[in-house]
Image (tube, grey):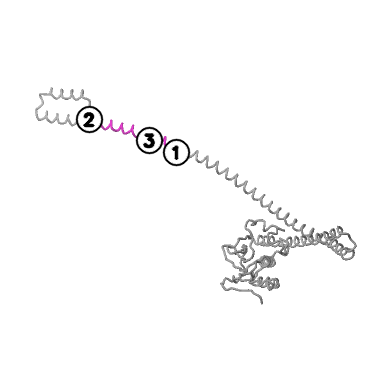
């Protein structure tokens, strides 16, 4: 209540002298009560107005913040939609590339098989005319060698020697191209029996060298039987052929790993330098003693057979001499594996 109005009321009270003191006192109390009520109402009005302004300001700030969040959300949704479309496009490109890659791999596989078949046919067809050249050169040497001058004799020897070397190259090329050209089937094979066959095939070499072949009991695996036999035979033959002064000791071990088997064929021979890790497995590469018989095709065949089984092959030099060849076979096990630590030793019989 304003001060002006309060004074007027007090003046009015003072002017009412005729009112008895009791009534005057009562009226004075009532007027003061009305005054206080007016002041209280005015304070509430001012407070309510202030609270409303604060609330309006807070509400406005909240609305602005909400609008900002909404804008950010819309921008995020737009960016997410953009990324989703980009991801969809990339997935489509990947699918197209995958189909293209699969088609190219199929074409490469077909081309590779055609090349292998061509190499086989070409090598096979070359054998006959080469054999004719060699035979006639040998016949000329036997019948008329004494009648030839020294230069002509040398020419005939070159023809005979060259024909023989070429025949060996063709034979080895045929052997290399024939790997995997059988029915290609993978059958349950007891590798202990495979090793017995290898021992029988190398019997003369084992007896002559005094070689010992020490082997843990091997597992039964689903493999290409012919290929695995050739792989073991090539490694054991090399271990015997490239031996040192001591009798060959060849140890065969294996370890079952997740999804594949790892085999180690270790010898005490003359060894092989690890710098030839890649070159050693290329066809017609002879890295050992050149005076030893051999074509340089054996390890290349081993590589091809290991790859045919989804594995690989490599070697390392032993600390005390010799070499350890390691190959893996990523093939399914068919039948119970023989994993006992029993040792089988093949020696001279």
Q: Secondary structure at mark 3?
A: helix
Residue placed under numbered mark 3 in the picture: 59
Q: Identify which residue, 83 or 49, lies in the foreground.
A: 83
| Label 1: which secondary element | helix
What residue is disc 1 on? 69
The answer to whether mark 3 and mark 2 are in CB contact below 8 A is: no
Q: Is residue 123 above or below residue 91?
A: below
Identify the image quadrant of residue 249.
bottom right
Q: Which residues are magenta?
A: 43-70
Q: CA distance from mark 3 to mark 1?
A: 15 Å
Report x, y in % for residue 316.
61, 60
Query: Magenta-highlighted stretch: main secondary structure?
Result: helix
Q: Is residue 30 left or right of residue 132?
A: left
Upstream in sequence: badge 1 or badge 2: 2
The alpha-carbon separation of the residues under discs 1 and 2 comes to 44 Å
Q: Residues within 10 Å of mark 2 (few under 14, many from 20)?
A: some
Give the camera-side residue of 236 and 76: 236
Q: Residue at x 20, y 24 (%)?
A: 3
Local crowd at mark 1 within 10 Å, few (<14), some, or many (≥20)? Answer: few
Nearer to us of marks 3 and 1 is: 1
Residue visible at 71% across and 72% down in the picture: 204
- How many residues crowd around disc 3 within 10 Å: few (fewer than 14), some, or many (20 or more)? few
**Percent x, y of residue 296:** 71, 60
């Amino acid at each position: 209540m304003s001060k002006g109005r309060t004074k007027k009321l007090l003046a009015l009270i003072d002017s009412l002298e005729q009112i008895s003191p009791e009534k005057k006192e009562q009226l004075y109390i009532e007027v003061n009560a009305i005054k206080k009520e007016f002041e209280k109402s005015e304070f509430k009005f001012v407070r309510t107005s202030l609270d409303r302004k604060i609330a309006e300001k807070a509400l406005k700030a909240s609305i602005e913040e909400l609008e900002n969040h909404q804008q950010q959300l819309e921008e995020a949704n737009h960016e997410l939609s953009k990324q989703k479309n980009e991801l969809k496009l990339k997935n489509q490109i990947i699918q197209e590339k995958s189909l293209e890659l699969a088609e190219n791999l199929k074409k490469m596989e077909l081309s590779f098989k055609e090349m292998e078949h061509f190499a086989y046919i070409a090598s096979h067809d070359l054998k006959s005319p080469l054999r004719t050249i060699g035979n006639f050169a040998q016949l000329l040497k036997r019948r008329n060698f004494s009648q030839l001058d020294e230069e002509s004799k040398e020419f005939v020897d070159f023809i005979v020697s060259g024909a023989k070397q070429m025949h060996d190259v063709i034979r080895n090329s045929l052997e290399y191209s024939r790997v995997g050209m059988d029915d290609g089937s993978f059958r349950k094979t007891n590798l202990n029996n495979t090793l017995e066959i290898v021992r029988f095939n190398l019997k003369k070499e084992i007896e002559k060298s005094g070689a010992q072949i020490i082997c843990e009991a091997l597992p039964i695996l689903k493999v290409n039987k012919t290929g695995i036999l050739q792989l073991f035979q090539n490694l054991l033959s090399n271990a015997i052929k490239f031996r040192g002064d001591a009798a060959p000791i060849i140890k065969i071990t294996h370890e079952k790993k997740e999804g594949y088997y790892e085999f180690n064929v270790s010898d005490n021979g003359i060894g092989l330098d690890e710098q030839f890790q890649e070159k050693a497995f290329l066809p017609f590469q002879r890295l050992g003693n050149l005076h030893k018989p051999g074509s340089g095709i054996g390890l290349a065949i081993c590589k091809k057979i290991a790859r045919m089984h989804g594995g690989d092959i490599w070697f390392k030099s032993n600390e005390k001499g010799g070499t350890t060849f390691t190959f893996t076979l990523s093939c399914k096990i068919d039948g119970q594996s023989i994993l006992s630590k029993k040792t089988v030793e093949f020696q001279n019989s």
